[in-house]
Amino acid sequence: MKIVFMEADTYGDDIDLTKFSQLGEVEIYPETDPEKNPHRIKDADVVVVNKTLMNEPTLKLASNLKLIAVAATGTNNVDFDYVNKRGIKVCNVGGYSTMSVAQHTFALALYLYEKLPYYDNFVKSGKYSATDLFTHMGRTFHELDGKVWGIFGLGAIGKKVAEIAGTFGCHIIYTSSTGKNTSGEYECVDFDTLLAQSDILSIHAPLHEKDKSIFNYSAFSKMKRDALLINVARGPIVNQADLAKALDDGLIAGAGIDVFDTEPIASDDPLLRIKDSSKLIMTPHIAWATVEARTRCLEEVYNNISTWKKENGVS
């Protein structure tokens, strides 16, 4: 059996893939290349992918392909109409990044909420050394206790964020993006109420067509002027041009963004105009990427391939 890893660099060079040789012949490609991908996988029985498109142009030469192992939870990159027609199985990995994404949510939120860029610069600039006071309160900040933490998308990650926010003393409200995830523990509200009442609003929803650009200028205009927006879910849920304008116009106080419409972010994206890190912090889609989460992800990929191999009597 031949296993081909696509875009292996996305798993990190600190993750050992040698274990997969126990399952068959392994071929590893560090980066994806749309022109070369069809030839790279043409002899593969199993292909391991993250974001590489699994559609007819990519798979047309892969006559032996039997399994697509997605090293992620989302499967938006798979053309299921085509792979189902071909009889190619697809498996993904769920739950591996819950703690990692929840942790990053709070890293972004607290960085902004406590005005840490300003205070860090105040000390490092020498201004603190030049003062007579032991403290400096140049920017007002608040406790999370008693504030409203809004959540858009109450899946596993959303629930973990709600749990942690609750330990800070926040009141939790949420809107289920699908209507499927509910909780008697937290207050379910409509989208406009979520916007209007949240002091911090974090997004943890999968990408559905109806939710593209749901966080737009109109939505931001309904939020509190001192509210923060955190997006660690999917880039297209937030209209980035509208977010940049909303930040410029003071509709919201700040945003922490880990995911983007286009990844890597386009060089002319309006968000790149905003250099003030006390207003906007951006990270390159790393919320999922603690070493523990990536290790769990690849372990589950290994288990998925191993189970499929046994169930199908593949040697």
Image: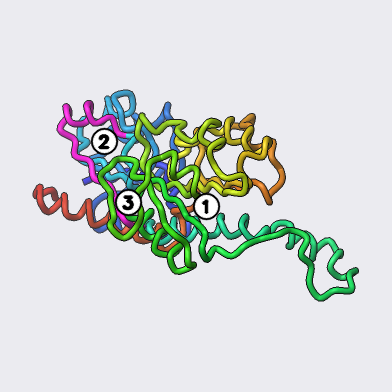
> What whole-number distance in Å separates the C-alpha atoms at marks 1 and 2?
49 Å
**Is 137 rendered above or below residue 282?**
below
Residue where numbered disc 2 is placed: 43
State if disc 2 and disc 1 touch (CB < 8 Å): no
* Numbered disc in front, either 3 or 1: 1
Asked if one can make out residue 262 in the rendered structure from this viewpoint, the answer is: no
Q: Nearer the viewer, residue 171 or 136?
A: 171
Q: Where is residue 269 in the image (x, y as percent from the top left)?
A: 61, 31
Q: Say whether disc 2 or disc 3 marks the residue closer to the N-terminus.
A: 2
First along the sequence among labels 3 and 1: 3
Tell me, yes or no, if residue 133 can be seen here: yes
In the rendered structure, which amino acid carries the disc numbered 1?
Ile
Q: Check contact, mark 3 vs mark 1: CB within 8 A.
A: no
- Mark 1: which secondary structure? strand
Q: Which residue is drawn at 38% across and 49% down?
A: 174
Secondary structure of the residue carrying tag 2 is loop
Q: Label 1: which residue? A: 200
CB atoms of marks 2 and 3 within 8 Å: no
Residue drawn 27% across the image and 47% down it? 92
- Bounds of the magenta segment: 78-96
Position of 131 compared to 237: left or right? right
Spot occupied by residue 165 in the image (x, y as percentages of width and height): 45, 62
Mark 3 belongs to which amino acid?
Answer: Gly
Q: Which amino acid does label 2 sit on?
A: Asp
Q: Name the residue under label 3.
A: 155
Asked whether, in this view, residue 73 is left or right of residue 245, the answer is: left
Circle nearer the N terminus (1, 2):
2
Kindly indicate the quadrant of the structure image that contains residue 16.
Answer: bottom left
